[in-house]
Amino acid sequence: MGSSEVGAISGSEWEIMRVIWTLNNVTSRQLSEIMGQKCDWSTSTVKTLLSRLVKKRMLATKQEGRQFIYHPLVTEIAAMSQTSLALFQRMCAMKVGKAILADLKELTLSKSDIDSLSNLLQEKRKTAPDEVPCNCLPHKHC
C-alpha cells in the first residue's frame, strides 16, 4: 500500500490520526495523554491502535532514546478524499449528486470553501453530461 492508498481504518484509528495530523510528530506518551483526556482511553488502547496504523502504513515510527515518535505517511486530505470517494463509488452513480447536496445542507463551510466549491462546480458544468447513467446493473437505468 503506497502513500496514495488508504486502508480501511476504524473510527478509533481516525481519532488517533486526527491528532497526529494536527501535531505531525508525536510521541506515544504525548498521544496517550491526549487520548486519555479526549476519549478516556488507556495507554494500552492507544499503543494497540498505533501498532495497527503502522501495519496499515498510515504511520511511521522511529525510536529516539526510550521514546517512539510517530508521524503520518498519508496526508489528511488524501485519506479523507480516498475514504469519501470509496463511499461514493458504492452508491448508484445517478444518486451521488443528491447525496452530496444532502451532506452540504448539514455541513458548516467557510466562505472560502464555498467560493472554491462554486468555482469548481462552474468548471465541472462545462463538461458535465445531462444525466449520469446508473451503474447498478449492466446497461440498465434505475
Image (cartoon, rainbow, N blue to C red):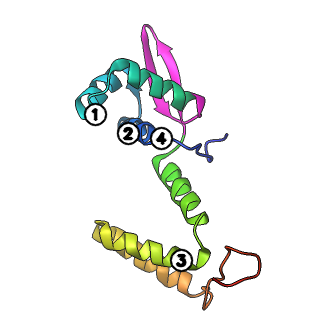
Q: Which labelled disc corresponds to residue 4? A: none
Judging from the image, what secondary structure is the residue with disc 1 in? helix
Earlier in the chain: of badge 3 and badge 2, it is 2
Tell me the distance, in whole angstroms, between the alpha carbons under discs 3 and 2: 29 Å
Quote the CA–CA distance across marks 2 and 1: 9 Å
Q: Are marks 2 and 1 in contact (CB under 8 Å)?
A: yes
Q: Secondary structure at mark 4?
A: loop
Spatial CA distance of label 4 from label 1 is 15 Å
Q: Is residue 106 left or right of residue 137?
A: left
> Does the CB distance between marks 1 and 3 fall below 8 Å?
no
Dot placed on the residue nearer the N-terminal end, 4 or 1: 4
CA gap, disc 4 and disc 2: 9 Å
**Pointer 2 residue:** 15
Do tag 4 and tag 2 residues touch (Cβ < 8 Å)?
A: no
The residue that label 1 is drawn on is 39
Q: In the rendered structure, does residue 56 fall within the stretch colored magenta?
A: yes
Q: Residue shown at 38%/41% (left/top)?
A: 18
For label 4, the residue is: 10
Q: Residue furthest left?
A: 37
Residue closest to the eye, 27 or 83: 83
